[in-house]
Image: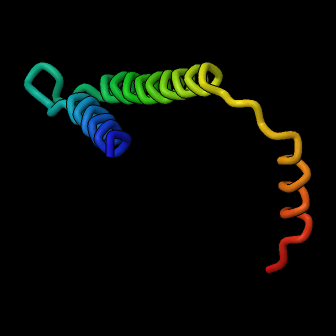
């Protein structure tokens, strides 16, 4: 559930940034702020990338910190399952 909350917050922030970049034309800029929308899209994309990379790094460090030694027979059992699997 926590992952879904984080995902929903990230989606909301992404859409808010993109909506902020869609400025309406005014008297000073009759054609709108066309290049500003690309800047906000870039900020949104970099933010999503950094949050995803940070989550992966934290998850990797946690897995390295709490890793357990695998039994010596596990690779044999896994390869046997893969080779003998029938569909």
Instruction: Tell me the residue at 15%/31% (across/down).
Output: 25
Q: Is residue 68 visible?
A: yes
Quadrant for residue 32, please give it.
top left
Quadrant for residue 5, please give it: top left
Quick check: 70 above or below 29?
below
Total labels drawn: 0
Q: Residue furthest left?
A: 27
Q: Between residues 67 and 48, which one lies in front from this camera angle?
A: 67
Relative placement, left or right, of 78 versus 49 is right
* x and y, in percent, of residue 4 in the image: 34, 45
Q: Choose between 19 and 1: the one closer to the eye.
A: 1
Left or right: where 68 falls relative to 22: right
Q: Please state which of residues 35 and 44 is positioned toward the viewer in this rendering.
A: 44
In the rendered image, residue 59, in percent from the top left (x then y), is placed at 54, 27
- Residue in the image at 91% along x and 51% along y: 76
- Image x and y of residue 13, in percent: 27, 32
Residue in the picture at 69% in, 30% down:
68
Does residue 31 appear in the picture of this structure? no
Picture coordinates of residue 9 (x, y %)? 27, 36
């Amino acid at each position: 559930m926590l992952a879904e909350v984080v995902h929903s917050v990230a989606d909301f922030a992404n859409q808010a940034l993109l909506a902020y970049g869609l400025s309406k034309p005014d008297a000073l800029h009759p054609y709108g702020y066309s290049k500003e929308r690309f800047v906000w899209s870039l900020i949104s994309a970099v933010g999503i990338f950094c949050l995803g990379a940070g989550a992966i790094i934290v998850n990797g460090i946690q897995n390295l910190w709490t890793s357990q030694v695998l039994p010596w027979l596990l690779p044999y059992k896994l390869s046997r399952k893969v080779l003998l699997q029938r569909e």
